[in-house]
Image (tube, rainbow, N blue to C red):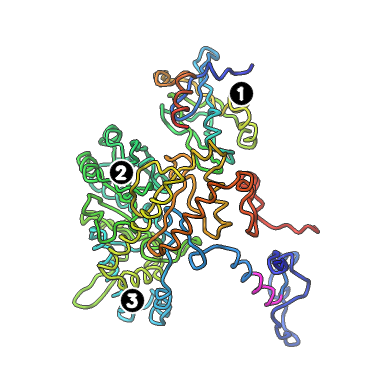
Amino acid sequence: MSRDKTKLLYAETHEWVDVAEENGQQVATIGISDFAIEQLNDLVYMELPEVGKALDAGDEFGEVESVKAVSPLYSPIAGEVTDVHEGLPDELDNLNSDPFNFGWIVKIKITDASGLESLMDYAAYQKQCAESG
Amino acid sequence: MRNQQATKLLFEMSRPGRRSHHLPALPAGSETVTDLLPAEQLADAPPPLPELSEGDVVRHFVNLSTQNMSVDTHFYPLGSCTMKYNPKRNERMASLGGIVDVHPLQDDESIQGMLQLLHELQGMFAEISGLPGVSMQPAAGAHGELAALFVAAAYFADKGETSRKVVLTADSAHGTNPASAQMAGFSTKTVKSGPNGLVDVEDLKSKLGDDTAVFMLTNPNTLGLFDAQVQEIADLVHQAGGLIYLDGANMNAILGITRPGDFGADLMHYNPHKTFSGPHGGGGPGAGPICVRDFLAPYLPGPIVEEHAGEFRCVNPAKSIGRVRSFFGNVGVLVRAYVYIRTYGKEGLRKVSEDALLGANYLLSKVKHFLDVPHGDRCMHEFVASASRLKKEKHLSAMDIAKRILDYGFHAPTVYFPLVVDEAVMVEPTETESKETLDAFAEALFRITEESDDLIQDAPLSTKISRPDDVTAARRPILRWTDPAS
């Protein structure tokens, strides 16, 4: 099933968040936006967290390196990492071309959903990108 | 046409049996390696080292050296790096017999001259920074950051304030700041810059608390701006019980004009390769001396040189965090800093900074007519322009400009740093450049902005290596030569 980028939530730091219910739990799938990838240029390296890592909203869960810079990845919500897209660092080409589906990075079981309130919808995020770009 | 022979890899030039030495034959009856070593210690075959004549080797390295740019061959406006020309006088002094032929394991009384030099240099670093405690052990600027943060951690531990675990860094900071904090066992939080490029004081206030250990500040900052709020910032951090760390990377801009100790800093490092003409780059050896306030001095790494009745000796501070480097660190770099400071003297050092400011502002006044400079018409010793508009209008990026400027015979400016400026082009001319050089560089930059994008996207066109594929180079680097025949 293809993810519709206009239906996702976005953090100021360019992560997208897709919240769904899995086995009675609120689970957030997180990636980085097409705008972030365009700004960073080609990605060359990615560091991922381990499954089981506990995160507070705003915590770093990994980093991406492009030919321009190294950028931390921030978790917009509090929770526990339940799944990691292990092969992704070896397929950064595919992340570049399909950030919203193939390019998911982690899944987080939400323990405190309050972080979701500060996220933007697609329209608000587009506005932020237009202002910064 | 350039002769390619001499710049082939040494392995490609290798021919079996070619030698640059002849060893005498072993006397008859000598034991061989198989007699002397047990079989399991012997390799199956000799290592596949290249076999070459002395001439091959010399030509190889001399030719390679001519393909690089350096401060001795080209203008090198690499922002943030302060690639000023280093006087050759330093090298002469640093290679005097009395300097190079002593050893740190000698008795103190037999190296009084060296200890006196180091003691005087400690005093100069203290005077220039306004911070009286000095340790010259760290071997690089980032090493100085790490050592100073260990000093801060030891200070807080001693006071029983173990909850102070957070180091704040500015979003325009050098990447080494948060990295050093992490390595020293702190967690980090980023303080935002306002639209004027300076610390957003409200954001700082919201992040201060009883967990605050240190705020690491670069002033002038990486945008080439002096943050005049620094006294207010220091007061806020001190009221919260934290310390101010001054990243001394940009000391070149304020020598003799103001002092970190006077504007509220508690700890700092110098980068002698930027400020005091130590050798630039190359991965070391370097030096990153640190200066601290009196109350932090007991925790400094030793040895520190003290004078008692005309005699110089090494001591370790009472509560020292221990050594961070063997002996005195890289003394050769410190000697160059000593010579530089003594050569210029008080007035001369102030003039160094004034000329660095003058050069940068002159260049800014020319460049702003064809590249946007988002943070104003005045700067300290460097400025950050943006290629953002050119990228939109002509698909010409900061990287394209950096590559093309090589064809004009200039080293590239720093690009994509600091991160707070889109398509950043960071220019630092330094105080050692003439008006003619600055004019020629500005002219070259202007011509590039007028050139066709096809041309520039393939640049550099005149260098031995054209534009490398940095994506593939980073994703799938080839780090060793393999014999195509094997």
How many numbered tags mark residues here? 3
- The quarter in which the C terminus of chain B is drawn is bottom right
Which of the pair B482/B457 is nearer the observer? B457
What distance separates the C-alpha of mark 1 from that of mark 2? Answer: 40 Å
Q: Per the image, is A116 magenta?
A: no
- In x, y percent, where is residue A97? 63, 30
- Identify residue type, mark 2: Phe
Disc number placed over residue B174 in the picture, else none: none
Choose top left, top right, bottom left or bottom right for residue B127: bottom left
Outermost residue, bottom side: B27
Give the left or right position of residue B230, taking residue B445 as reference: left
Q: Which residue is mark 3?
A: B114
Q: Amino acid at mark 1?
A: Asn
Q: Which residues are magenta?
A: B53-60
Query: On the same chain: label 3 and label 1?
Result: no
Which of discs 3 and 1 lies nearer the camera? The answer is: 1
Q: Residue at x 47, y 27 (%)?
A: A130
Q: Which mark is residue B215?
A: 2
Residue B430 position (above or below residue B25)? above
Q: Which residue occupies 34% across, 50% down?
A: B379
Dot 1 surroundings within 10 Å: few (below 14), some, or many (20 or more)? some
Residue A49 vertical position relative to residue A27 in the rendered view, above or below: below
- The residue at which mark 1 appears reads as A101
Label 1: which secondary element: loop
Circle 3: is it few (<14), some (14-19), or many (20+) Cα within 10 Å? many
Three-letter amino acid code of the residue under disc 3: Met
In which chain is the residue bearing label 3?
B
